[in-house]
Image (cartoon, rainbow, N blue to C red):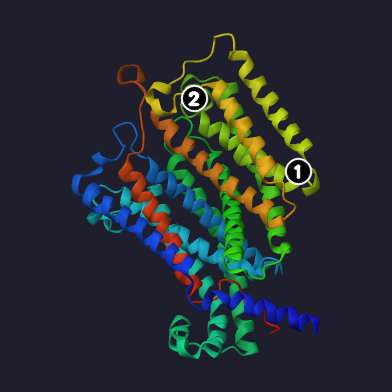
């Protein structure tokens, strides 16, 4: 009787978003529509009318903000489908209710990634040339093929995992029966035999989805890694690094979506679900840190001039804020939030210890250059970042961030701790992608004649990027009104 009551509460909770439209929901949709309109205006009226000259791209930097977000979104889509596949293959009871959110994330992020490729093309009316004149020997065409295959696979998994709940919603919302029937493609059989057949299909597709996810982000890495003219791109470690970061950022984004969805609609999602995702993150973050350390050690120990210039620019130059914020706020702090007991992290003693450890660690790295022998900084390329590029200011900023985050997040709630750690991991991986994509383009061969490259995103670029992300968030809000985002309990 107690389990039945629990199932009934969960059933009603998961259907709650489908009832009515609140004022906050309407305001959120209106705000997102405004961002989409703003991005569309700058895309059509500015970029497509005047060309890519309105962006910050130039002869040196031909891949900028759009490609950064493309690589990032491909990664989080791969991580989303891995969570869903594990739920179907290993039948994790904790992950099964949220497998639909993970599948929707994989589908939406891959579509958004494709949109970033579309807007990055100077002549978008020739987008179909990729399919007509593509060469199979090009990694770009490999990426097109795997994206199409992966998107189709994710959509089939999403349909099979949602169809039964669409049929159940026909009885709960008879006025919308036609809509649910349309979304279910007219197939309304939810007999035990039909459900078991779909479970077998989902398990089979999940076995194919995991290697497809690995291949998806590996090929995306090979687009960069097979370019010999860029020293820090041309490395065999880039593929595994992208896969590991895809798992970490993808699981983190799934966790963040689950926490936000639960908070918005007061869904009955238990602590075990978010706690299980937190354990996966606690395992993947150290692996990601290891790959980053291995790459940096190889570059610095080898001492090659070209690679060392990129490394110096990343650690001490104008891109240093991205590197240090990613390292401390995007990796170390989330790991502490995930592995430290809640009681310890909530205390002032832990806050002071974390701040002191961060101060000492960064000071040790800064100290050898404190005598005035620091490498030349390139802050003049980015005047707005000049203050942040100085080690002393950077050190103060990072210590301040650690103190604030360890004091503001003194909560014993699993949702607050794991959700905050997930948001920080997503931010850190995005900063990592920025350094990987842009930095190697700043230092070209014959740099002594052409100088170090420069790149600052312009307002049209930022507006278009915000519009694309707003489109994804808008799709999430709309889908939340079409069908349950969390799988309905079978025992109800």
Q: Earlier in the sequence, mark 1 or mark 2?
A: 1
Q: How many marks?
A: 2
Left or right relative to 294: residue 229: left
Work out which residue is located at the far left of the displayed protein and give it. 49
Q: Is residue 20 above or below residue 274?
A: below
- Of circles 1 and 2, the one toward us is 1
| Quadrant for the C terminus in the image | bottom right
Which residue is at 47% across, 44% downward? 222
For label 1, the residue is 345
Q: Is residue 286 visible?
A: no
Q: Position of residue 257 (x, y in %)?
A: 57, 60
Q: How many residues crowd mark 1 within 10 Å: few (<14), some (14–19), many (20+)? A: many
Q: Which mark is residue 389?
A: 2
Q: Position of residue 173 (x, y in %)?
A: 52, 87
Q: Is residue 338 above or below residue 350?
A: below
- CA gap, disc 1 to disc 2? 30 Å
């Amino acid at each position: 009787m107690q389990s039945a009551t629990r199932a009934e509460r969960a059933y009603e909770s998961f259907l709650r978003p489908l009832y009515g439209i609140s004022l906050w929901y309407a305001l959120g949709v209106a705000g997102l529509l405004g961002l989409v309109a703003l991005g569309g205006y700058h895309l059509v009226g500015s970029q497509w009318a005047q060309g890519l000259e309105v962006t910050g791209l130039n002869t040196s930097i031909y891949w900028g903000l759009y490609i950064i977000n493309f690589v990032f979104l491909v990664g989080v889509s791969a991580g989303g489908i891995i969570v869903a596949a594990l739920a179907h293959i290993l039948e994790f009871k904790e992950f099964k209710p949220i497998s639909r959110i993970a599948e929707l994330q994989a589908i939406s992020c891959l579509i958004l990634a494709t949109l970033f490729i579309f807007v990055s093309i100077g002549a978008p009316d020739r987008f179909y040339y990729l399919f007509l004149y593509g060469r199979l020997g090009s990694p770009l065409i490999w990426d097109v093929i795997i994206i199409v295959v992966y998107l189709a696979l994710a959509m089939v998994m999403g349909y099979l995992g949602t169809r039964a709940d669409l049929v159940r919603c026909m009885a709960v919302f008879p006025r919308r029966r036609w809509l649910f029937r349309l979304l279910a493609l007219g197939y309304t059989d939810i007999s035990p035999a039909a459900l078991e057949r779909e479970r077998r299909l989902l398990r089979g597709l999940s076995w194919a989805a995991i290697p497809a996810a690995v291949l998806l982000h590996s090929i995306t890495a090979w687009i960069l890694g097979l370019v010999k003219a860029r020293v820090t791109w041309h490395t065999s470690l880039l593929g595994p690094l992208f896969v590991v970061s895809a798992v970490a950022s993808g699981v983190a984004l799934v966790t963040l979506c689950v926490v936000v969805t639960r908070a918005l609609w007061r869904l009955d999602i238990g602590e075990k679900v978010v706690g299980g995702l937190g354990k996966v993150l606690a395992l993947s973050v150290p692996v990601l840190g290891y790959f980053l350390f291995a790459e940096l050690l190889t570059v610095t120990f080898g001492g090659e001039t070209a690679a060392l210039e990129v490394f110096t620019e990343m650690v001490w130059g104008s891109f240093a804020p991205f590197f240090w914020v990613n390292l401390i706020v995007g990796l170390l702090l989330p790991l502490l939030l995930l592995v430290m007991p809640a009681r310890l992290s909530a205390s002032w003693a832990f806050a002071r210890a974390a701040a002191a450890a961060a101060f000492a660690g960064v000071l040790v790295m800064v100290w050898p250059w404190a005598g005035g022998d620091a490498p030349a900084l390139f802050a003049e390329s980015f005047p707005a970042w000049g203050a942040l590029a100085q080690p002393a200011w950077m050190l103060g900023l990072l210590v301040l961030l650690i103190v604030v985050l360890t004091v503001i997040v003194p909560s014993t709630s699993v949702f607050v701790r794991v959700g905050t750690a997930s948001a920080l991991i997503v931010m850190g991986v995005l900063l990592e992608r920025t350094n990987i994509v842009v930095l190697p383009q700043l230092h070209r061969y014959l740099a002594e004649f052409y100088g170090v490259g420069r790149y600052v995103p312009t307002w049209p670029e930022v507006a278009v990027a915000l519009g694309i992300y707003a489109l994804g968030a808008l799709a999430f809000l709309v889908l939340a009104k079409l069908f349950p985002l969390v799988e309905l309990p079978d025992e109800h």
